[in-house]
Image (cartoon, rainbow, N blue to C red):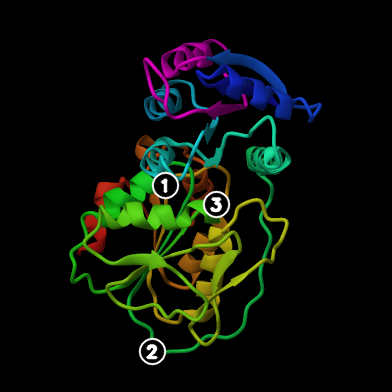
Amino acid sequence: MKIAIVNDLTIAVTALRQVLQTVPEYQVVWVARDGAEAVTKCAQNTPDLILMDLLMPVMDGVEATRQIMQNSPCAIFVVTASTDKNVTKVYEAMGYGALDAVDTPVLFGKDAAITANKLLSKISRISKLLKKSPGTKIKLSTPASNQVPLIAIGSSTGGPKALADILSKLPANFNAAIAIVQHVDAQFSSGLVEWLNQQSKLPIRLAVTGDSLQKGTVLVAGTNDHLYLKPDLTLSYTKDPIKYPYRPSVDVFFKSLAQNWKRKGTAILLTGMGKDGADGLGALRKQGWHTITQDKASCVVYGMPKAAVELNAAIEILAPDDIASSLLK
């Protein structure tokens, strides 16, 4: 895998190089000291993955992510000194297409091995996503009744911004339950919810085991396991399929709805890398759901919606603003 490093701190670049050197197939192809340099170098030599810092001179990592994803798109992974202290910028970068975020590894001390392993684990996961690993079917039980109107949304790369665009246009008295599965590490799920709450009139919180879907409330998958709907119409999490690279999986959630949610709802598949959610959206369409994918022009990565369109899983193909308008009809 060809990897680029964007960071203005020599000690951070050294730490990243040392960690990457432990994996023979990882090759550092270039280093940039600010976002503007990264944009230029990426246009000349687009890597498989960029390790992007957030706080840099000339151009920060958020703007660099935006420009790279617009002009020379590739996988971008935010690696910065403190993700907790920069959570707003983390989600701005994810809105423009960054896949995940992690703290910069340290060279010395008791945390050196821990931070290195965390970085390598996440890069390995991204590598699997880039290879577009095939989906895995899940079997669930029979349905129940008495459901509220439901909107189910799946999203990945660039999803936070698309979600904010949709949720910001829904009124406080919106007459449906909303459930969201966004590909995001559990470490950042609470930050995502906090950020989305700033954009929405509706209350948004993480889904916990035992939750029921309720009108006027937005529930977001909040762990690295897969959210799914049980036959008793409560939500829970499962590790299976354990080797599925997309976590939490949109397909797992959508397919559980197809099995257990009798009332016909609306399912939406937004921007994202890979194919997760396409099969699930197709299953919901077969059950009579109204299915929508985000259009190519507004997607940061036209992967998941494209896969769904190719499967004829989408009834409508819309931009986020038009999706919001459709939900208000």
On the question of residue 72 being in view, the answer is yes
Q: Position of residue 187 (x, y in %)?
A: 53, 53
Per the image, the residue denoted by label 2 is 146
In depth, the one of 183 and 292 nearer the eye is 183
> Image point 28% across, 53% down: which residue?
166
Residue that sits furthest to the front in the current view: 109
Whether the residues at callouts 1 and 3 have beta carbons within 8 Å, the answer is no
Residue type at mark 3 is Asp
Per the image, the residue denoted by label 3 is 185
The mark found on residue 159 in the picture is: 1
Q: Position of residue 55 (x, y in %)?
A: 42, 27
Comparing labels 1 and 3, the label whose residue is closer to the camera: 3
* Magenta segment: 33-60
* SS at circle 2: loop
Disc 1/disc 3 C-alpha distance (Å): 13 Å
Q: Within 10 Å of the Cα at label 1, are there few (<14), some (14-19), or many (20+) other Cα atoms?
A: many
Say whether residue 310 is left or right of residue 15: left
Say whether residue 271 is left or right of residue 24: left
> Image point 53% across, 14% down: which residue?
32
In depth, the one of 139 and 107 nearer the eye is 107
Disc 2/disc 1 C-alpha distance (Å): 31 Å
> Image point 50% across, 73% down: which residue?
257
* SS at circle 1: helix
N-terminal label among 3 and 2: 2
N-terminal label among 1 and 3: 1
